[in-house]
């Protein structure tokens, strides 16, 4: 689902599309808002936009993913090697082990096939305090090709340090 197909959130989508077009998407973002308003869909669409190989080709928008190429399709299905969605995985919370395995152990590597490694942590408010502390250093000094998107309905439950390093959208 490309950014242009997102219903609602016009101001937010326009802001993100301008960032994509300029090549200036922040390396960490906090998508905050009530449950069910489409925060996760916007995060996936942004992952497509920054990684779409067709973006900017003749006749294609320079600020959005096409939604049709193999890269965009695999991101939408959750099968792209450079886009990781970190969730509870059937547990009560996102533990430090999950952050280490899914994020910290691979964040330093260059993207395998895309422009950026994207890490979507949803729901970010379910990270334990230890997991937040482990992620903090990487948010302070992210590798050049990494983008972090924290998705939450309860941003106040995240540590003040995490909140201060992620521009809040929503």
Image: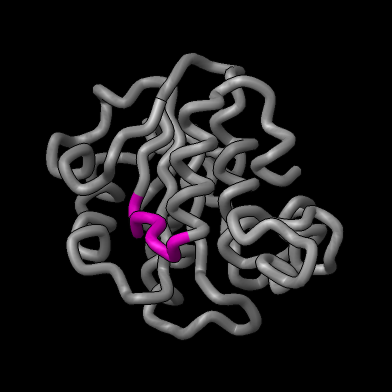
**Residue 60, above or below 144:** above
- Residue shown at the point (77%, 57%) measured from the top left: 66
Pick the quarter of the image with the C terminus.
Answer: top left
- Residue shown at the point (36%, 21%) measured from the top left: 154
- Report if residue 93 is visible in the image: no
Percent position (x, y) of residue 110? 47, 85
Horizontal side of 9 relative to 72 (left or right) equals left
Horizontal side of 37 relative to 145 (left or right) equals right
Q: Main secondary structure of the magenta part?
A: loop
- Farthest residue in the top direction? 34
- Report if residue 76 is visible in the image: yes
Pick the quarter of the image with the N terminus.
Answer: top right
- Corner quadrant of residue 160: top left
Q: Nearer the viewer, residue 39 or 61?
A: 61
Percent position (x, y) of residue 164? 16, 41
- Corner quadrant of residue 108: bottom left
Q: Nearer the viewer, residue 11 or 145?
A: 11
**Residue 90, above or below 18:** above
Horizontal side of 23 relative to 160 (left or right) equals right
Q: Nearer the viewer, residue 126 or 9?
A: 9
Percent position (x, y) of residue 94? 43, 43
Stretch in magenta = 22-28
Horizontal side of 164 relative to 125 (left or right) equals left
- Residue shown at the point (62%, 61%) measured from the top left: 62
| Count of numbered tags | 0
Which colouring convention does the figure follow?
one colour
Percent position (x, y) of residue 80? 70, 66
Q: Please tell me whether residue 24 belongs to the stretch shown in magenta.
A: yes
- Residue shown at the point (65%, 42%) measured from the top left: 3
Q: Nearer the viewer, residue 28 or 8?
A: 8
Q: Please tell me whether residue 90 belongs to the stretch shown in magenta.
A: no
């Amino acid at each position: 689902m490309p950014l242009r197909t997102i219903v609602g959130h016009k101001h937010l989508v326009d802001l993100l599309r301008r960032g994509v077009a300029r090549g200036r998407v922040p390396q960490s973002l906090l998508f905050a808002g009530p449950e069910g308003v489409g925060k996760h869909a916007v995060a996936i669409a942004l992952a497509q936009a920054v990684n779409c190989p067709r973006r900017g080709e003749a006749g294609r928008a320079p600020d959005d993913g096409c939604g049709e190429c193999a890269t965009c399709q695999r991101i939408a299905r959750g099968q792209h090697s450079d886009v990781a969605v970190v969730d509870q995985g059937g547990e009560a919370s996102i533990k430090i082990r999950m952050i280490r395995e899914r994020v910290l152990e691979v964040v330093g590597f260059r993207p395998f096939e895309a422009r950026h490694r994207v890490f979507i942590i949803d729901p970010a408010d379910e990270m334990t305090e230890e997991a937040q502390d482990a992620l903090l250093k990487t948010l302070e000094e992210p590798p050049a090709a990494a983008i972090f998107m924290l998705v939450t309905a309860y941003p106040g439950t995240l540590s003040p340090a995490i909140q201060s390093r992620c521009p809040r959208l929503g």
